[in-house]
């Protein structure tokens, strides 16, 4: 587990930790002990264990020093009970977890695993941020070079500006297709992007449907050949009787995709034939070839930036504690799945789950124990779902599950599975051995006619959850049941009034 992991143990008296050090070495860690905190140099370590027998303010100063020296080491604090305010301050200052002594080897092992996972995510984000910074610097350099060109090339600069304004791939492609026409007119534009799985086509005439379909198929094959080719740094070329320009998109040795512009001229129609009753169009020339060669690098970098930005966004929508998606991701995913269910007339189930009496866990055993319960609860939820289902930590102890293509009956099967697994599980077993229950509210589209939007679907599921909690918790309630109860109550009232 810790193979090659560099660990530093800071303790005023390292001798009592001999068994702990031996255990860490058995797991594969390379352990060094220090009897004093170093405030000046950046420790070369993946994990830092600090015993809380140092003065509190020295520990705090040491953590601030790690931050200033941009250390990526994951810090674990261990020791006896500290004041809650001090633990909270140390966690905010950079401590990943607090291990109350004495603690079991399993508790230490879990803490180390989670700390290393957290550090891995941090390094990934830092790496992506560095790549973005390098790419942006390169893009800025290209932009500065373009400024030196004559007024005839000002349109290239305008396009470059448009491409750099967005980090979303759809906006980058739209800017490209719109702006490039200003200095390189075309009839059909095709863009193949590696890993995209489809070809984007822009055409001047809607009636060219058959031609567009053929060109799109050709572009897919050409792009795949480009990906598989061992040759790097391919050059922009004019071909097919000057009727096409093919622009390879690369960043360094990385292949991004292929841009292909087509003019309906000598390559596909006889030279003397007129297009739509007008004069014969001019085909691509060397000057346009040079211009497209110039924009290929900024375009490729803009597309690469957008791809990396999406990776960073993906990390940003993950809940660090449970590894489920967070509330930031919820609205977009629910909107997408709801519109898909509307379009294809398919079922969609939404489940809102609340942990019963979770505040009591935090108040009685502390927030670290509560965090551990949340982590283990998320694992149970995830193991109860399919790959296409979506688990979201909505906030605090509340989770949301989106079940695409799932009707109410199947949704109840999932809800009962989750409820039973939670009831039979022991949470935070290494420390406390807690038993938990959950309350679940379910709404389903298109069962109720009043559910006409993602917001309404969530509202109905939320109301069902609160009904379950009002009935004593550890319950499953559906929006349909609530509606039926309201209807029966109204009918009963009307019958009483009539009689």
Image (cartoon, rainbow, N blue to C red):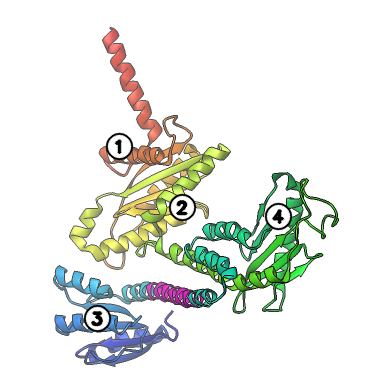
Lower sequence index among marks 3 and 2: 3
Determine the CA span between mark 4 and mark 3. 61 Å
Q: Which residue is mark 3?
A: 63
Q: Residue at x 27, y 37 (%)?
A: 471
- Secondary structure under the numbered disc 4 in the rendered image: loop
Residue 22 location (% of width, % of height): 34, 88
Report the span colored magenta. Answer: 116-139
One can see residue 299 in this view: no
Lower sequence index among marks 4 and 3: 3
**Quadrant, the N terminus:** bottom left
Lower sequence index among marks 1 and 3: 3
Q: Which residue is mark 1?
A: 467
Vertical placement of 38 versus 433: above or below?
Answer: below
Q: Residue furthest top?
A: 499
Mark 4, mark 3: which one is toward the viewer? 4
Q: Which residue is mark 2?
A: 390
Mark 1, mark 4: which one is toward the viewer? 4
Lower sequence index among marks 2 and 1: 2
Residues 228 and 121: in front is: 228
Determine the CA span between mark 1 and mark 3. 46 Å
Mark 1, mark 3: which one is toward the viewer? 3
Mark 4, mark 2: which one is toward the viewer? 4
Tag 4–tag 3 contact (CB < 8 Å): no
Q: Residue at x 27, y 75 (%)?
A: 94
Determine the CA span between mark 1 and mark 4. 60 Å
Lower sequence index among marks 1 and 4: 4
Residues 205 and 150: in front is: 150
Vertical placement of 20 versus 104: above or below?
Answer: below
- Secondary structure under the numbered disc 2 in the rendered image: strand
């Amino acid at each position: 587990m810790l193979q090659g992991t560099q660990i530093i143990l800071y303790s005023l008296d390292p001798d009592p930790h001999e068994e702990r050090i031996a255990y860490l070495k058995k797991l594969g860690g390379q352990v060094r002990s220090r009897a004093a905190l170093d405030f000046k140099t950046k420790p070369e370590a993946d994990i830092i264990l600090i015993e809380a027998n140092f003065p509190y303010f020295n520990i705090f100063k040491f953590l601030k020093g790690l931050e200033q020296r941009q250390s990526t080491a994951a810090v674990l604090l261990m020791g006896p009970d500290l004041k809650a305010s001090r633990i909270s301050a140390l966690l905010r200052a950079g401590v990943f977890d607090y291990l109350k002594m004495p603690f079991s080897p399993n508790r230490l092992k879990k803490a180390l695993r989670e700390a290393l996972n957290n550090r891995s995510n941090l390094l990934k984000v830092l790496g992506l941020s560095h790549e973005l910074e390098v790419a942006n610097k390169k893009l800025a350099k290209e932009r500065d070079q373009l400024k030196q060109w004559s007024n005839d090339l000002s349109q290239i600069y305008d396009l470059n500006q448009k491409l750099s304004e967005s980090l979303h791939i759809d906006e980058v492609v739209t800017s490209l297709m719109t702006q490039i026409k200003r200095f390189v007119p075309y009839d059909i534009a095709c863009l193949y992007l590696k890993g995209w799985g489809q070809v984007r086509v822009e055409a001047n005439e809607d009636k060219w449907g058959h031609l567009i379909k053929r060109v799109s198929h050709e572009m897919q094959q050409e792009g795949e050949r480009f990906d598989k080719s061992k040759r790097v740094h391919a050059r922009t070329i004019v071909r097919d009787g000057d009727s096409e320009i093919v622009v390879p998109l690369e960043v360094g040795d990385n292949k991004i995709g292929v841009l292909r512009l087509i003019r309906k001229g000598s390559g596909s129609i006889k030279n003397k034939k007129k297009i739509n009753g007008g004069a014969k169009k001019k085909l691509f020339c060397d000057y346009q070839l040079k211009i497209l060669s110039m924009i290929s690098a900024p375009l490729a970098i803009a597309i690469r930036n957008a791809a990396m930005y999406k990776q960073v966004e993906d990390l940003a929508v993950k809940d660090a504690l449970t590894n489920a998606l967070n509330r930031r991701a919820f609205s977009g995913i629910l909107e997408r799945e709801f519109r898909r269910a509307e379009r294809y007339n398919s079922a969609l189930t939404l489940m809102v789950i609340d942990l019963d009496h979770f505040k009591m866990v935090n108040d009685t055993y502390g927030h670290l124990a509560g965090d551990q319960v949340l982590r283990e609860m998320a694992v149970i939820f995830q193991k109860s779902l399919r790959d296409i289902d979506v688990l979201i930590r909505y906030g605090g102890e509340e989770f949301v599950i989106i079940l695409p293509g799932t009707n109410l009956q199947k949704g109840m099967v999932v809800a009962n599975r989750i409820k039973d697994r939670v009831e039979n599980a022991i949470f935070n077993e290494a420390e406390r051995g807690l038993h938990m229950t959950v309350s679940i509210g379910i709404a389903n589209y298109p069962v109720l006619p009043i559910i006409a939007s993602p917001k309404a679907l969530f509202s109905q599921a939320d109301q069902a959850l609160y009904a379950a909690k009002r009935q004593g918790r550890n319950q499953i309630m559906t929006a349909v049941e609530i509606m039926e109860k309201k209807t029966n109550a109204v009918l009963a009232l009307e019958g009483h009034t009539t009689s």
